[in-house]
Amino acid sequence: MDKNKIFEIKTSEEFNDIAIDMFEYQYKNNPVYNKYVNLCGFRTNNIQTYCEIPFLPIELFRTKKIIIGSNQIETVFFSSGTTNKEKSKHHIQDLDIYKKSILKSFQKFIGDPKGYSFLCLIPDFENNPNSSLACMASELISLSQQNYSGFYLNREKKLISTIKLLKEKNIKFILFGLSFALLDFAEKYKINLEQGLVIETGGTKKQKKHIIQQELHKKLKLLFNTPKVYSEYGMAELLSQSYHRDNCFESPPWKKIIIRDKTNPFKILKDKKRGCINIIDLANINSCSFIATNDFGYLTSSGFNILGRSQNASERGCNLMI
C-alpha cells in the first residue's frame, strides 16, 4: 500500500476507492482483523462503498496485537486510560506516517507550524515516549523551529514569562494542552491570551471531576480573554487528528467518521442521527484503518460532534493522570 497516495486524496471517490483497497489489503494481511471479519460472517466479496466495510472494535487493541506482517516495530503508543485495566497498544512500524499525518492535518486546519511557538501543557515526550499525544507535541515543537517552543507542564512561572515575552515580541504562539491542565492554569493566573491561540486536546475528566466541551471552552475564553478555543481529537489507536474550530470537528481527506446504531453495531445510521462513532483512518496502513470506537456523537454538514462515551464503555483518552 502506497503511503504517499493516502495523503493525496482530494475527492470522495478517491477516498472510497482507496478505502476499499485498504480493506482488501488489511483483511488479507492482518490476522486479527481477518479472524474478526470471518467470525462475524461478513460478506467481503462485493463491497462497493466504505460504509459496507467491517469495523474492528477498539477494545481489541487492549488484548491483541493489531498489526500487518512482521516488520520491525519503531514504537508502541499506549492509551492513557483511567482504570487499572489493560491499556490499548498501537504498534507503529513506520513513524514517518504519523509525522506526515500530524503535519498535513495541522497545515490544513491551523496553518504552518513554523509560524507559531508551541507552549505545551502536557507531559513531556522524553519521559512519556509511548504517548501519541506527547509524540505529536514533540513533532510540532520540532517543526516550529522556534526556541520558545517546549513542554511547560509543572513549569508555570516559566510559561508565564515566556507568554509575556512572546507578546512583547509580537510572536504568534499556541497554548496546546490537556483540558484540565489548561483550565487549572487559566483559573490560577487569568493571563490574557488575546494574541495567542488555545488548543485543548481532550481530557475532560480528572479524578472525579468532569466538564463538557462547551462549558470548558466558555470558561477558557473568559479566563484567557480570547475569542476562540480550538479542540484536537485523536487517540492512541489512530494516526490522524480532527480539529474543532467553529461548530464541529473536521477531519482531513484521508479520514472519515461514520455513525453506527448504539444497539446494533453492524447498522450504519444516516441523516445526522446520534449513535456510536466508527472511524476510517487510512493513515493506519500497518494496523487497522477501520475502528469502531465507544465515543457517542453525530454527523454535521461539515464534520462531526462528540456527545460523550457510550454506556458501559471502558475509559480511555488523554486524561491528566498527574
Image: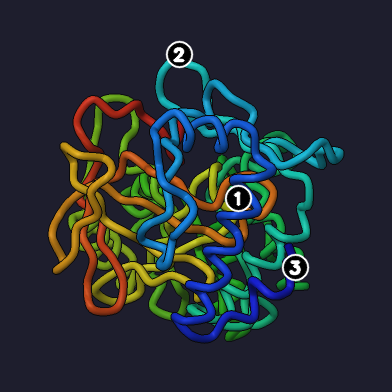
Which dot, 2 or 1, sits closer to the camera? 2
Q: Furthest residue to the top?
A: 84
Q: Residue at x 64, y 28 (%)?
A: 65
Say few, some or many: other residues with alpha carbon within 10 Å of mark 1 (under 14 / 14 to 19 / 20 or more): many
Say few, some or many: other residues with alpha carbon within 10 Å of mark 3 (under 14 / 14 to 19 / 20 or more): few
Q: Are marks 2 and 1 in contact (CB under 8 Å)?
A: no
Say few, some or many: other residues with alpha carbon within 10 Å of mark 2 (under 14 / 14 to 19 / 20 or more): few
Q: Which mark is residue 296?
A: none
Which dot, 3 or 1, sits closer to the camera? 3
Quadrant of the rendered structure where residue 295 is? Answer: top left
Compared to residue 134, the image places residue 259 above or below, namely below
Three-letter amino acid code of the residue under disc 1: Tyr
Q: Residue at x 43, y 54 (%)?
A: 53
Which dot, 3 or 2, sits closer to the camera? 3
Task: State the residue position of label 2.
Answer: 84
Q: Furthest residue to the front?
A: 45
Can residue 104 be seen from the camera position used here?
Answer: yes
Q: Secondary structure at mark 3?
A: loop
Task: State the residue position of label 1.
Answer: 152
Quadrant of the rendered structure where residue 150 is? Answer: bottom right
Three-letter amino acid code of the residue under disc 3: Asp
Q: Which mark is residue 2?
A: 3
Between the C-alphas of marks 3 and 2, the distance is 38 Å
Compared to residue 227, the image places residue 51 above or below, namely above
| Between discs 3 and 1, the one toward the N terminus | 3
Residue 142 located left or right of residue 242: right
